[in-house]
Amino acid sequence: MTTTARRAARAALASAVALGVAAAGSGTAANAETEWRILHGGQSLGGSFGAVAAADADHIWAFGDDQAQSDGATWVYGWDGRQWTREDLPEQWSLVPEVADASAPDNVWAAGRGADRQAGTLRYDGEEWRTFDLDPALWPNDIAAVAPDDVWLLGGIPGDPPRAARFDGEIWRDYSAPRVGGALSALDSGDIIAVGEADDRPAVDRWNGEEWVPMAAPEVDVPPGESGAALTDVLARADDDIWAVGHIHYKDPDDVAHRKPILAHWDGTEWDTTVEESDTGYDVVVDDGAGGVWIRESHWNPTYLHRAADGAVTRHTVDGGEYDLAVFGMAHVPGTHRVVAAGTAFEKGDPDEFHDYGVILGHGF
């Protein structure tokens, strides 16, 4: 997690409300495989996590750095089906990973930036981790590992037009960018979905193998005045099965900021869009391995919504005890019904000495 993200997380401490535990509507405690729980982390670990990637049940990685209050040395913890172990990295790489993806155990990627405005990527090829420098202006927003010789990176400096880079198996090259810079999801090398906002409204672009083409976007009603709407993440499972999440943002007459979450599904012809009335936003959507999806509601003490294939929705939270949880990374574990997430546990209150630490969370483990 970058220093900017850490400061934002700490700033939320003053007004954050601690969340409970177990699935909504449950009268009894759930067992270990049906509740979200902390899989790894503690005061002795320290550090922080900001991204996570999974190739299968025995190959999962959490990315971050060994400091919780400021940027430290890059670290990666890997899961081999039995335990989490810190992995050896190139000594010269000191960036803080913010996004990650994996298409196979030997094609794992993370991207991040550092305090000196540098940017870069980290790749595991099944034997060792290697590093690649990026243009410092390419701040990573999302990464999609399609194949060992086809990886997309979407990013750019906030406020500037989105930028894209593509890895061809040897080097990263600047590439044609979509209008939107929020998130990516690939069906294959010739069919990639990008989401974000254009003119303060949800927008979707689609890569057809040659160029990015604007696609129909979810339509939402936005209040007048200082307001807008954006999509923050996308999950493409098939041409007729694409999920997108985001939020509407606006200010009321008292100049108080509000949000409403957006959930949209593309069936190959049109978007079925739902705007909830709760004062929050949806920021991540991932597969559940059974035809449904997991949705994260906010990164601060997050609520996880599970929408099953039949449309049934349950709400889940994680008990951080004496800590508030800031969770940024989330991924489905292919071939399973498991989901993994990673972030940082911040000690509540204003202690004389902080004992914050990185945490890896999971559901279905």
Image: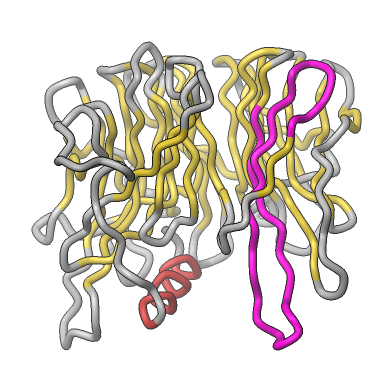
Up the image or down, 217 lies above or below 70; here it is above
Camera-side residue of 145 and 340 = 340
Camera-side residue of 25 and 208 = 25
The residue lying at 48 percent from left, 31 percent from top is 307
Percent of width and height locating residue 323: 22, 66
Image quadrant occupied by the N terminus: bottom left
In the image, is 183 to the left or to the right of 162?
A: left
Q: Is residue 249 a member of the stretch shown in magenta?
A: yes
Percent of width and height locating residue 143: 59, 35
Choose top left, top right, bottom left or bottom right for residue 48. bottom left
Camera-side residue of 257 and 23 = 23
The residue lying at 73 percent from left, 28 percent from top is 193
Percent of width and height locating residue 318: 27, 50
Percent of width and height locating residue 207: 81, 24
Q: Is residue 227 a member of the stretch shown in magenta?
A: no
The answer, for residue 93, to whether it is visible in the render is: no
Image quadrant occupied by the C terminus: top left
Which residues lie in the magenta part?
243-272
The residue lying at 34 percent from left, 15 percent from top is 336
The residue lying at 88 percent from left, 31 percent from top is 216
The answer, for residue 340, to whether it is visible in the render is: yes
Up the image or down, 117 lies above or below 86; here it is below
Q: Main secondary structure of the magenta part?
A: strand
Q: How many marks?
A: 0
In the image, is 223 to the left or to the right of 150?
A: right
Up the image or down, 336 lies above or below 219; here it is above
In the image, is 3 to the left or to the right of 349?
A: right
In the image, is 172 to the left or to the right of 92?
A: right
Choose top left, top right, bottom left or bottom right for residue 54. top left
Q: How is the image coloured?
A: secondary structure
Up the image or down, 180 lies above or below 149; here it is below
